[in-house]
Image (cartoon, helix red, strand yellow):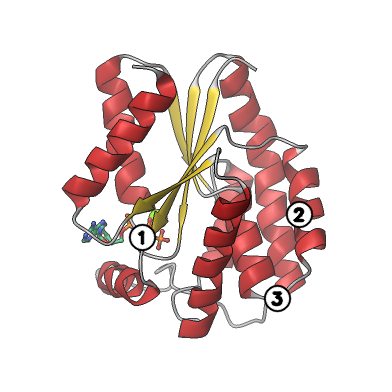
Amino acid sequence: MAGWFITFEGVEGSGKSTQIRLAGDLLQELGLPFVLTQEPGGTPLGERIREILLNRGDFDISGEAEMFLFAAARAQHTDAVIRPALEAGKIVLCDRFTDATIAYQAYGRGLSLESVREVCRMASRGLAPHLTLLFDLPVETGLERAFRRIAGREGNLREDRFERERLDFHRRIREGYLAIARQEPGRVKIIDASGGIEPTRQEVQSLLSAFLGV
Ligand SMILES: Nc1ncnc2c1ncn2[C@@H]1O[C@H](COP(=O)(O)OP(=O)(O)OP(=O)(O)O)[C@@H](O)[C@H]1O
Ligand SMILES: [Mg+2]
């Protein structure tokens, strides 16, 4: 595959969505062809699943059901958006991917790591990012930011189902992400996300420039 697949990962409010937009601006300036997309989402099916997963409804979602819903969204997204863009030689910037499922559903929810990995492999048919930027910060800082954003939203689509989980759930997710980074230091680059938007952007820019050789 000709393009580069780059994912943005981290706990709630770590700045993924902010920084992926800025990274898109950078690629635009550099004149490099890219696609900016997100999980869950990225396709009409994925956006419907996103609504179910990220908002609080009047029904329960078990850990397994949650994993399969993320996987279903990913299967569609990988086939319909990510692979075609990579085959066309584009850079794909994706807000969350398989590492999020491993961190949230295995480390966070406590599902078996092997099962989650296998489901993820099936969903993406083995597609893995070439580079992953892991935005790391204390979960309290991220949640504070996330709740400020949530407070600005109205109605039932606040996307706050995960944010409202207990603190220890978020801490396990952070640890899960850091464990993944330790296992795959070549692919996963840890970025200190506790500072301001601009210093974080600069760190992202230098990692991306080095990776892309520009
Ligand atoms: N470095 C920063 N310092 C302070 N505030 C920030 C910083 N980066 C982002 N924010 C703000 O914090 C909020 C959360 O940021 P953002 O949406 O980028 O995080 P996220 O990682 O995508 O969160 P989520 O996991 O909930 O999607 C936003 O309102 C954003 O403007
Ligand atoms: Mg986001």
Image x and y of residue 169, in percent:
54, 79
The amino acid type found where label 2 is placed reads Arg
Dot 2: what SS? helix
Nearer-N-terminus badge (1/3): 1
On the rendered structure, is 112 left or right of 144? right
Q: Name the residue under label 2.
A: 117
- In the image shown, does 201 or 13 lie closer to the viewer? 201
Identify the residue shown where x is 19% and y is 47%: 199
The amino acid type found where label 1 is placed reads Ser
Identify the residue shown where x is 31% and y is 14%: 31
| Quarter of the image that includes the N terminus | top right
- In the image shown, does 90 or 160 lie closer to the viewer? 90
**Compared with residue 9, is residue 144 higher up or lower down, i.e. above or below?**
below
Q: Mark 3 points at which residue?
A: 110
Residue 145 in view of the camera: yes
- In the image shown, does 47 or 160 lie closer to the viewer? 160
Q: Mark 1 points at which residue?
A: 14
Q: Is mark 1 within 8 Å of ligand 1?
A: yes
